[in-house]
Image (tube, grey):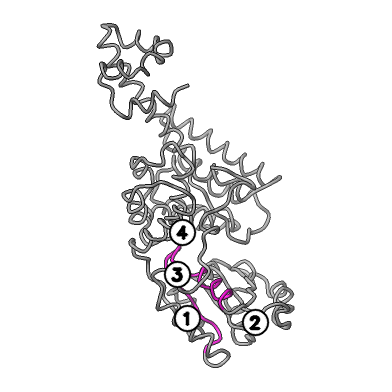
Amino acid sequence: MTKGKEYQNWSEKHRVLKFDEIKGQGHAVIELKKFFDNFPHGKKAILFHGSPGTGKTSLAYIARNEYDFEVYELNASDFRNKEQLEMKLKPALEQASLFKRGKIILVDEVDGLSSLKDRGGLPELIELIDGAQFPIIITANKIWDSKFGELRKRSLLVPFKDVDYRDISVILQGIAKKEGLNLNNQIITSLAVKSKGDVRAAINDLQMIASYNNLTNSSELIPLLDERNKEIDIFQALKIVFKNLLTQDSLRIYDSVDLPLEKIFLWVEENIPYEYSGEELYKAYEALSIADVFRGRIRRQRHWRFLVYQNIFLSAGISLAKKKPKIGFTHYQRPTRVLKIWTYNQRDQYKKSIIIKYAKHTHCSKKKANLEFNFVKSILKNPDVQKRLDLSDKEIKYLKELN
């Protein structure tokens, strides 16, 4: 996966810009239009709630485009301290937009407020709504905790349903066309179904497949994509470990993730550089290396009691690498090493099957055929030889890709 300036996340690159482009959320669009038409009468905040990747934040930015408004964005971390929040908000609330018709206050991922134990939090958000001069859009995945009772009373609640896989298929087909991808309908449909209503996840899967051009047209890639409910769990766990300060909950956060610790290790390893830098990066990798030491001891000595230490360094150790909470959205990536290992194994599988056929035809051992492979691979590329060995299309394709 390309990193740095060359990498552009497709879910951002292909974010919809107009009301009629958003799929599966017609009811939410109607409610949002009513909310803006009635403001400042009635509710001063509209609360979008539903599963990740269903278009909540996208709809807020569509409203910005459609109404020619400026968006002033806040997240849960901004509400930790009342004084800092007032310093940040006061200029935004007292001054009209200089270049746009109006202004929207966007409070994204308000669920994070439930984990804040210090000053600020929900009371500050309620106070912001009560004194609002501009429309407030709030997003949340889950909003039915009793702590959000007052927030629900003061907001117009708009549910977002999981997007139908057929709508997601249309979205993916459009992106594939724009990106010049030649994908068959089976892959597109499989991605849409596996996303379980999460458009952003489906687009991320599409981009992951596209990054391995030699496998783009192979439906064998589909089993590589983990079930979406597992990914939601790991994404939430990474967010808690990477962004929040250490709590009792984050210490055992991986216990609730439906993935083995081996895979969690790869997810953490892949995403540390996206969240940490400088001294924090060094400390996070140091914690990861200690976790790896315990992992090695478990493998060699079968001392399963070390699992608890591996878990602690993957959670508490990496969480303690930072001095203060992280704010803003971070796009976490799937571990590319898993896919690279799988790709190598697939290629090695075709090599082994060719060697078996070659050994049988030349009446030599498989060990001898393996030793001779690099010398005879140019001969094996001959169509007549391939026909005599009865090589499959995939075995022939493997030979063609060899240098």
Closer-to-camera residue (271/83): 271
According to the picture, the residue beneath numbered tag 2 turns out to be 102
Q: Quadrant of residue 131?
A: bottom right
Crowding at mark 2 (Cα within 10 Å: few <14, some 14-19, many 20+): some
Give the alpha-carbon distance from disc 4 to disc 3, as whole Å: 12 Å
In the rendered structure, does residue 3 fall within the stretch colored magenta? no
Give the percent coordinates (x, y) of residue 323.
68, 54
Mark carried by residue 258 = none
The amino acid on which the numbered mark 1 sits, given as a three-letter code, is Gly
Q: Quadrant of residue 169?
A: bottom left
Say which amino acid is labelled 4: Arg
Query: How many tags in the picture?
Result: 4
Q: Which residues are magenta?
A: 43-66
Provide the secondary structure element on which disc 3 rests: loop
Where is residue 314 shown, x and y percent of the image? 53, 45
Query: Nearer the N terminus, badge 1 or badge 4?
Result: 1
Where does label 3 land, which residue? 22
Query: What residue did someone put label 1 on?
Result: 149
Amino acid beneath label 3:
Ile
N-terminal of the pair, mark 4 or mark 3, is 3
Kind of element beneath mark 2: strand
Would you name the residue on which mark 4 appears?
A: 200
Packing grade of label 3 (10 A; few <14, some 14-19, many >=20) is some
